[in-house]
């Protein structure tokens, strides 16, 4: 069996997406009609993995699902997407995690029951070989157990000693503590969105926040939604301002698809600038369908947009 290009550590769970431009839930047993509701493959880890697989990588995922109908559905969907599930386990003692996303188009609220999302622990990390793939990405850091978070820096150190590169996407910290010092020291690429980055750096100024996080030794790649993305990689600043036009449906999972695009660009040997462009293109195109994976583009479609999405580079 050939080596995996990418192993994703993190959450595998369904998303229930309830969409309506005027969505405003009311308590008091009020029944409201909405435009649409969908049950789709979710979880930052799973969406990143599927997006990278669509772009041509051999991808595995290390996560936990429950021994229930939702867990079985996640396994079927990941298998159909071509994922390697060697490191995906089933926990019969917990239900599969789930997120309910209330989507108004321009904004959304996310309600998450962690279930098996937080079941991934240090024993799962210890069971991984020193080189489980060419690159290892950790997703939804703040949804994982404190034991997993404590063990991740040493695990990343072990991987890097074996020649594996690493990346991290935290998503939002429900406790808003934003403590990342130890894990960033063992991370090659940090992939936050702009709101998360400025919260972590405790600075509202984007350039200053990028510089501050870069002092930890990692490259910083920032998702900016319809404003593109910025990155600081090996002393070079990169900016993408132009995005492909799309018929927008929702932005659920767009940041995770951005992650998959960036990692695919690196692991396909395209270099950091092209990888940033691929990330912006993939993330933008994914907003053309409901949920995180429905609109994810294949490599040919992303490559078709590369000349139309230039990258400005600047030595820092």
Image (spheres, rainbow, N blue to C red):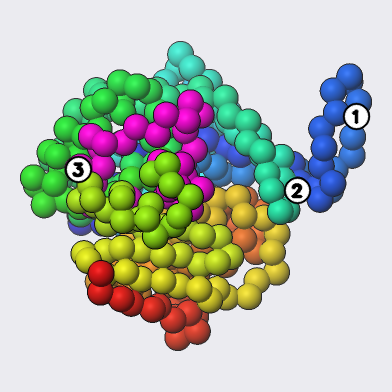
Q: Residues within 10 Å of mark 2 (few under 14, many from 20)?
A: some
Q: Position of residue 91 (x, y in %)?
A: 42, 21
Q: Position of residue 14 (x, y in %)?
A: 57, 37
Is residue 223 in view from this perspective?
Answer: yes
Q: Is residue 250 magenta-colored? A: no
From the viewer's perspective, is 167 left or right of 93? left
Q: State the residue position of label 1.
A: 31
Say what secondary structure mark 1 lies in. Answer: loop
Q: State whether residue 9 is above or below residue 252.
A: above
The circle drawn on residue 85 is: none
Q: Is residue 192 magenta-colored? A: yes
Disc nearer the start of the sequence (3/1): 1
Q: Which residues are magenta?
A: 171-200
Q: Residues within 10 Å of mark 1 (few under 14, many from 20)?
A: few
> How far apart are the two marked residues, 3 and 1, measured between alpha carbons?
49 Å
Q: State the residue position of label 3.
A: 186
Disc nearer the start of the sequence (2/1): 1
* Cβ atoms at labels 3 and 1 below 8 Å apart: no
> How far apart are the two marked residues, 2 and 1, measured between alpha carbons?
17 Å
Q: State whether residue 126 is above or below residue 239.
A: above
């Amino acid at each position: 069996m050939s080596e995996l290009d990418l192993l994703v550590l993190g959450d595998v769970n369904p998303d229930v997406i309830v969409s309506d431009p005027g969505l405003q839930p009311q308590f008091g047993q009020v029944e409201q009609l909405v435009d649409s509701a969908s049950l789709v493959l979710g979880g930052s880890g799973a969406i990143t993995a599927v997006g990278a697989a669509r772009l041509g990588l051999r991808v595995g995922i290390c996560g936990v699902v429950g021994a229930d109908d939702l867990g079985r559905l996640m396994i079927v969907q990941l298998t159909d997407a071509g994922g390697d599930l060697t490191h995906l386990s089933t926990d019969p003692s917990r239900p599969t995690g789930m997120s309910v996303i209330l989507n108004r188009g321009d904004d959304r609220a996310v309600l998450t029951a962690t279930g098996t999302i937080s079941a991934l622990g240090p024993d799962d990390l210890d069971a991984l070989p020193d080189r489980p793939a060419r690159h290892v990405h950790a997703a939804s850091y703040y949804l994982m157990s404190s034991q997993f978070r404590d063990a991740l820096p040493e695990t990343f150190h072990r991987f890097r000693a074996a020649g594996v590169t690493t990346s991290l996407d935290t998503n939002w910290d429900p406790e808003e503590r934003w403590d990342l010092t130890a894990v960033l020291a063992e991370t090659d690429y940090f992939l936050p969105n702009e709101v998360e980055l400025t919260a972590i750096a405790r600075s509202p100024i984007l350039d200053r926040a990028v510089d501050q996080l870069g002092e930890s030794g990692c490259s910083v790649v920032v998702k900016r939604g319809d404003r593109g993305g910025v990155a600081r990689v090996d002393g070079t600043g990169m900016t993408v301002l132009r995005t492909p036009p799309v018929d927008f449906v929702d932005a659920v999972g767009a940041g995770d698809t951005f992650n998959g695009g960036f990692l695919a660009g690196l692991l396909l040997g395209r270099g950091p600038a092209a990888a940033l462009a691929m990330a912006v293109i993939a993330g933008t195109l994914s907003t053309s369908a409901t949920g995180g994976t429905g609109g994810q583009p294949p490599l040919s479609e992303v490559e078709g947009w590369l000349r139309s999405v230039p990258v400005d580079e600047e030595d820092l």
